Each structure stands twice: as C-alpha cells, then as structure tokens.
C-alpha cells in the first residue's frame, strides 16, 4: 500500500473514534435533558462510528498493513441546545466526508483498487449521514428548539420514524 494512503487511513481513524466518543457524550447530555429519542439516536451514531473505524482497521489488517490507533481527547460534555448539538454533529460528519474524499483521491492516484472499493462505500454512507443530520436540523428549525416541537422530533427519533432518516436496518449510520 502507498505510504501516504496508509498514513491517511490511520489518521482518519482518529475522526471516526473522536466522533464515536463525542456522540456517546452527546447521548448522555441529551438523556439528562429528557430527550431520550435524541439520546437513542446518538448512541446508535456512536456505535456506527466504531463500526466504521473497524472497517478501516479490518482493511489494513487484511492487507498486512500497520494499524496505529490514535489517542482521543475528552469530548465536550455540555451543549447550549439540541440544535447546537446537531450542528456540531453535522460539522463532524462534514469533516469525515472531507477526509474520505482526500483518501479517495490518494487511492485513485495510487491506483489502489481495494482502497477505492472501501472508500466508495464510505462516500455513499457520508452522503446519507449528512442528509440525515440536515433533516433533523430542518425539523428543529420548523418545530422549534423548545417545547412541543422538540418533543415531537424526539418522539420521531425514538421510534425511528423521522422522514429522510435511514432505518435502523439501513446502511450503518453516521461516520
């Protein structure tokens, strides 16, 4: 494997683990604010991030490459609102998307077909993940950041019935 691509994949692991760590902290914050649907959604997103990291690790191991697990900083534990928290999630997802796109360019330049196949799955996944978070932010803007509107969105997330959201049986959640 091309050394630059290998380094890029190991560096990308930090984004996946960081997102998982932050999403778990967000889940705890949401639960303490009685937004259990949001909390359940963030717990699933956290688990999905770990699965995404594992996909990269498995890819590297299968190709007899060195895996370098990153140190992860303590995540924030407070957000000003559910909307601010979701904006942070979107920023995380956009950073992951940018990293995947950079890795894809490196894989193409190196003509590394196995990496391209892996990364194509992530390109599709990231489109879905960003769209899902945008849908939630759109609902928050329509329904409001407090009161009944927010509780309705929370209920939709709790039952996995929000329009535009992949189902639990979907592709695997956020990156």
Image (cartoon, rainbow, N blue to C red):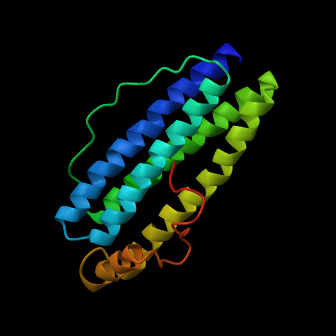
- The residue at the point 34 percent across, 83 percent down is 152
Q: Can residue 80 be seen in this view?
A: no
Left or right position of 126 against 168: right
For the view shown, which residue lies furthest in the bottom direction?
148
Q: In this view, does 159 lie above or below 112?
A: below
Closest to the observer, 140 or 53: 53
Q: Position of residue 109 (x, y in %)?
A: 79, 25
Left or right position of 79 against 12: left
Q: Is residue 45 above or below residue 163?
A: above
Q: Is residue 157 above or below residue 6?
A: below
Left or right position of 20 against 64: left
**Number of numbered discs on residues:** 0
Q: In which quarter of the image is residue 62?
A: top right
Closest to the observer, 98 or 113: 113
- The residue at the point 55 percent across, 56 percent down is 172
Q: Quadrant of the N terminus?
A: top right
- The residue at the point 53 percent across, 70 percent down is 165
Q: Quadrant of residue 59?
A: top right
Q: Can residue 124 be seen in this view?
A: yes
Q: Where is residue 91 in the image (x, y as percent from the top left)?
A: 45, 49
Closest to the observer, 25 or 141: 25
For the view shown, which residue lies furthest in the left direction?
32
Q: In this view, does 113 lie above or below 169?
A: above
Q: Where is residue 22 in the image (x, y as percent from the top left)?
A: 33, 45
């Amino acid at each position: 494997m091309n050394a630059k691509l290998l380094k890029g994949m190991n560096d990308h692991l930090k984004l996946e683990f960081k997102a998982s760590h932050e999403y778990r902290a967000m889940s705890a914050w949401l639960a303490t604010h009685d937004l259990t649907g949001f909390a359940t959604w963030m717990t699933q997103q956290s688990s999905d991030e770990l699965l995404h990291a594992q996909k990269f690790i498995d890819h590297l191991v299968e190709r007899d490459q060195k895996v370098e697990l990153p140190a992860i900083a303590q995540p924030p534990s407070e957000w000003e609102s559910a909307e601010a928290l979701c904006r942070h999630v979107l920023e995380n997802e956009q950073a992951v998307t940018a990293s995947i796109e950079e890795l894809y360019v490196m894989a193409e330049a190196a003509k590394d077909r196995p990496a391209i196949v892996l990364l194509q799955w992530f390109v599709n996944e990231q489109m879905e993940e960003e769209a899902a978070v945008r849908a939630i932010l759109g609902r928050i803007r329509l329904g409001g950041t407090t009161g009944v509107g927010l509780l309705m969105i929370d209920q939709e997330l709790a039952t996995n019935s929000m329009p535009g959201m992949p189902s639990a049986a979907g592709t695997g959640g956020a990156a």
